[in-house]
Amino acid sequence: MDKLHLDQHISRQFNEDLEQIKTQMLEMGGLVEKQVNDAVTAIENSDSGLAEHVLEVEVNIDEMEMEIDEACTSLIALRQPAASDLRMVLAVSKTIRDLERIGDEAQKIAKMSISLTESGGAPKGYVEIRHIANGVRKMLNDALDAFTRFDVEAALDTRKADKQIDLDYKSALRELMTYMMEDPRSITRVMNILWTLRSLERVGDHAKNICEHLVYLVRGKDIRHGHKGDLEKSD
């Protein structure tokens, strides 16, 4: 397993500041995980009350993102970090943006849940939601866990799971499109299912991004465009 060796500083406060932004980021990640779980539960159980709660909490996620981003900006301006310290600040800054966008997707799912409850639910698609939701929730949990431990190998393994999420999403899309053509009366309600699946697929994309931010943090390599062959052979 990789070990991240942050630069040593005369200022203990600098070390504490670096640890603080990481801790805040992981707290935000925990809240975002709960948002996704609650949004999926709301749509599975036709629970409008829980969906409304997801919409209310979204404000807290936005506030956390702005607070952590401001802390990162201040840390760069005041401490002028270099090497691994700078990568830590940048990785946190990028990760909170992905977490905020995951929160946005949870918000969209909650809105779809309310719409489906009001319309009496969709005739098809809940099995697909459950299946893909299980996959992306595991991805998100594993990505944040890898970040906690600075575990590049775990991040790379988690990153690979996004390919299966994409395949499952495309398969569900084809099946539901066929169903709507066969029963045009279902189009409006099934479209809400399709938008939900799209949001879940996007959650997987953002979890993948978090894994890539961690690789950049620990090894200083950018693998966003798939150039990771040398990375997996090294160390």
Image (cartoon, rainbow, N blue to C red):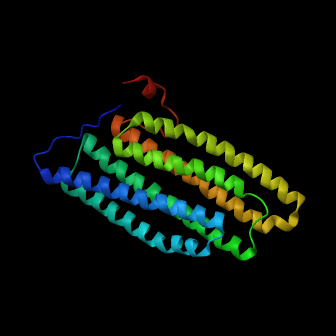
Image mark count: 0
Q: Residue furthest right?
A: 182
For image coordinates 64% across by 69% down, the residue present is 113
Query: For residue 233, which quarter of the picture?
Result: top left
Inspect this view and state whether residue 189 appears.
yes
How far across and down, in percent of the image, does residue 32 sit? 46, 60
Q: Residue furthest top?
A: 233
For image coordinates 61% across by 58% down, the residue present is 199
How far across and down, in percent of the image, does residue 141 sit? 47, 49
The N terminus sits in image quarter: top left
Residue 15 drawn above or below residue 68: above
Q: Residue furthest left?
A: 10
Q: Is residue 104 left or right of residue 115?
A: left
How far across and down, in percent of the image, does residue 56 sit? 49, 75
Q: Is residue 151 left or right of residue 71?
A: right
Inspect this view and state whether residue 76 appears.
no
The C terminus sits in image quarter: top left
Query: For residue 30, which quarter of the picture?
Result: bottom left
Residue 32 drawn above or below residue 146: below
For image coordinates 74% across by 46% down, the residue present is 171
Q: Is residue 140 left or right of residue 18?
A: right
Q: Nearer the viewer, residue 155 or 33?
A: 33
